[in-house]
Image (spheres, rainbow, N blue to C red):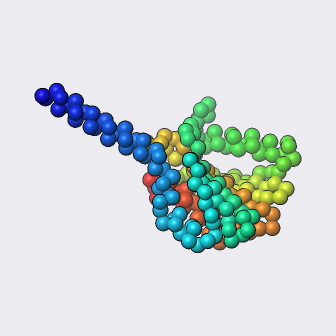
């Protein structure tokens, strides 16, 4: 009887743990899509969003879709052969910029460190320009027990002659932060 009770108790605890882990993985984007941030995005009628498995594609309705953005979760994102995640990202960035220049497709303008939530989220913002558009990339490194090491990335594409609506950069920073526990 005691053994049966122990087995049932252990089975119950394991089912809760496994269920919680699976639920947590499935719910990361839901932290954003179920929030007031996402509801307000569509109410303001500036952005339209399409939710995919590990990313969200945005189109600027107010600017005739001349601006778009893509928020994605790259998981797992580990240091691999580098000493740290920032070192890996900056190395990948150098290769990307070199390829842009050698293929005459565009050029990288700048990359600088950024942080949010009192340095709880750290990453980089980068800009590059092409013949007909400009890109602004924002990334944060994030490691939550339920998901492991991740790279949260938003790339905003801006066609030439178009200006970003007010608050666009802050909107996407808030959307990225909402995916984390540091919101």
Residue at 27% across, 33% down: 11
Q: Nearer the viewer, residue 36 or 173?
A: 36
Quadrant in the rendering for residue 176: bottom right
The mark total stands at 0
Residue at 72% across, 64% down: 65
Which residue is farthest left? 1
In screen coordinates, is 100 left or right of 73?
right
Quadrant in the rendering for residue 48: bottom right
> Where 21 sits versus 173, above or below?
above
In screen coordinates, is 20 left or right of 46?
left
Q: Nearer the viewer, residue 181 or 52?
A: 52
- The quadrant of the rendering that contains the N terminus is top left
In screen coordinates, is 166 left or right of 101?
left
Which residue is farthest right? 104
Residue 47 appears at what percent x and percent y? 63, 66
Residue 136 appears at what percent x and percent y? 70, 57
Q: Is residue 139 visible?
A: no
Residue 142 appears at what percent x and percent y? 52, 47
> Where 172 sits versus 10, above or below?
below
Residue at 76% across, 54% down: 128
Residue at 85% across, 43% down: 103
């Amino acid at each position: 009887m005691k053994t049966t009770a122990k087995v049932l108790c252990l089975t119950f605890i394991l089912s809760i743990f496994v269920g919680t882990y699976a639920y947590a993985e499935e719910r990361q984007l839901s932290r954003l899509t179920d929030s007031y941030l996402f509801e307000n995005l569509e109410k303001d009628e500036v952005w339209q969003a399409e939710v995919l498995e590990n990313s969200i594609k945005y189109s600027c309705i107010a600017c005739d879709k001349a601006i778009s953005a893509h928020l994605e979760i790259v998981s797992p994102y580990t240091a691999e052969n580098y000493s740290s995640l920032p070192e890996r990202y900056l190395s990948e960035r150098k290769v990307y910029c070199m390829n842009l220049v050698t293929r005459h497709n565009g050029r990288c303008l700048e990359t600088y460190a950024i942080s949010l939530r009192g340095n709880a989220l750290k990453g980089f913002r980068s800009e590059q320009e092409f013949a007909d558009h400009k890109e602004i990339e924002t990334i944060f490194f994030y490691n939550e027990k339920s998901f492991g090491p991740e790279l949260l990335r938003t790339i905003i594409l801006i066609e030439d002659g178009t200006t970003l609506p007010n608050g666009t950069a802050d909107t996407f920073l808030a959307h990225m932060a909402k995916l984390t526990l540091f919101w």
